[in-house]
Amino acid sequence: MIASKIEIQIDEKAIQEKFEQKIEDTLAAQIWFCDVERLSLLTGMSKRFLEENILNHPYMKAIERKKSRKRFYKASDALNVIDEITREW
């Protein structure tokens, strides 16, 4: 049997850069407010489905914030309320 030797070289700088990029991506994902478009992306539900089944619910109306005709929701509250609404199904 032939003895073999394996050497592994680790590029610490590349690992550090990848780690920092992952942290930045995670922090960017922490959103404060969201609109119907963002809720659609976060939940995987279509805008039409959200309008018909979620956004007209009294719980969602309670956390809704409007500016002109644009509706916003505090992201953490909205996801918690959607969780509550869908538990009722």
Image (cartoon, rainbow, N blue to C red):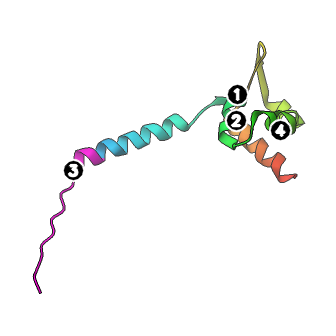
Position of 7 with respect to 32 (left or right) is left
Q: Distance between the residues labelled 4 and 3?
A: 48 Å
Query: Is there a contact, CB below 8 Å, between mark 4 and mark 2?
Result: yes
Q: Which mark is residue 54?
A: 4
Q: What residue type is labelled 3?
A: Asp
Q: Residue 7 carries which label?
A: none
Q: What residue type is labelled 2?
A: Leu
Image: magenta residue range: 1-15
Q: Distance between the residues labelled 1 and 3?
A: 41 Å
Position of 48 with respect to 30 (left or right) is right
Q: For residue 22, which quarter of the picture?
A: top left
- Residue occupying the far front of the picture: 1
Q: What residue type is labelled 4?
A: Ile
Q: Distance between the residues labelled 4 and 2?
A: 10 Å
Q: How far apart are marks 2 and 3 (CA)?
A: 39 Å
Query: Is there a contact, CB below 8 Å, between mark 1 and mark 4?
Result: no
* Residue depicted at x 26% and y 45%: 14
Identify residue for label 2: 39
Q: Residues within 10 Å of mark 1 (few under 14, many from 20)?
A: some
Identify residue for label 1: 35
The first of marks 1 and 4 along the sequence is: 1
Badge 1 marks a residue whose secondary structure is loop
Identify residue for label 3: 11
Is the residue 18 above or below the residue 63 in the image?
below
